[in-house]
Amino acid sequence: MNDYLSSCLERYPPLVICENDIKCACDLIANSFRSECKLLICGNGGSASDSGHIAGELLKSFCTKRKVDETVRKALGNDVADNLQGALPAISLPDMVAINSAYANDCNPQYCFAQLTYGLGKSKDTLLCISTSGNAKNVILAAIVAKAKNMNVVGLTGATGGMLAQHCDVCIKAPESETFKVQELHLPIYHTLCLMLEQIFFG
């Protein structure tokens, strides 16, 4: 697991200051999965795309072959099980287009992610909030709801952490301030998180 993190830090030296926070975020998310809970992910624009990207890496094999649980294999039979891969439960909230557009049309759109967190989240789940500035209002509102529901909150932001940081159990602050530069560092951070989680559960 630490090999993935070490490799990331070698390739992206500015992220050395994020090392401990990446480890802590991995631990929080892993504990949710161990408790048969899930990961919710939210963000806007490029961060919305990142949300779907992260969910995709977790819901199927990433870099390690993932076998289907043997109990499930016996219930399904080999023909079906051989075409499935081990998965970690992750939901990208921005990708829920129908409910997001309905809520934005009928209610205050700033509360879309908060509503989905309220409806889908439960105690011991983790919410991963992505905001390059750390000040996206709809993401902060989702974090507030998550804490009220006894969920873990992980932030992925730029250098300051913004207002979001105060609502997080751990906040990974990419050491840049310009949006595109922050996003360039978010990719190796969340790829490393996904690799670490895959190693824990399927390595």
Image (tube, helix red, strand yellow):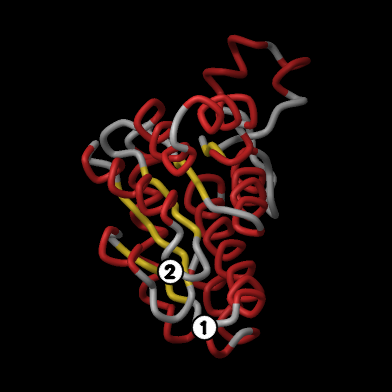
Hey, which residue is sitting farthest bottom in the picture?
13
Three-letter code, disc 1? Leu
User: Percent position (x, y) of residue 91?
Assistant: 54, 37
Q: How many marks?
A: 2
Q: Is residue 172 above or below residue 96?
A: below
Labelled disc at residue 15: 1
Do the numbered discs 2 and 1 sit on residues whose CB atoms are within 8 Å? yes
Residue 170: quadrant of the picture: bottom left
Residue 22: mark in rendering: 2
Please say if 186 is above or below 143. below
Residue positioned 35% across, 57% down in the render: 27
x, y percentage for residue 2? 48, 71
- Front one among 54 and 26: 54
Closer to the camera in the image, 167 or 35: 167
Q: Is residue 146 above or below residue 131?
A: above
Residue 111 position within the rendered picture, expressed as x and y whole percent measured from the top left: 42, 39
Q: Residue 57: which numbered mark, if any?
A: none
Q: Earlier in the sequence, mark 2 or mark 1?
A: 1
Q: Where on the picture, by quarter, is residue 134?
A: bottom left
Q: Secondary structure at mark 1?
A: helix
Q: Nearer the viewer, residue 199 or 16?
A: 16
Amino acid at circle 2: Ile
Q: Is 2 positioned to the left or the right of 185 in the image?
A: left
Dividing the picture into quarters, in which one does residue 202 lie?
Answer: top right
SS type, badge 2: helix
Q: Residue at x 46, y 41 (%)?
A: 40
Q: Nearer the viewer, residue 78 or 58?
A: 58
Give the Cα distance between marks 2 and 1: 10 Å
Residue positioned 28% across, 47% down in the render: 144
Label 1: few (<14), some or many (≥20) within 10 Å? many
Q: Position of residue 160 (x, y in %)?
A: 39, 79
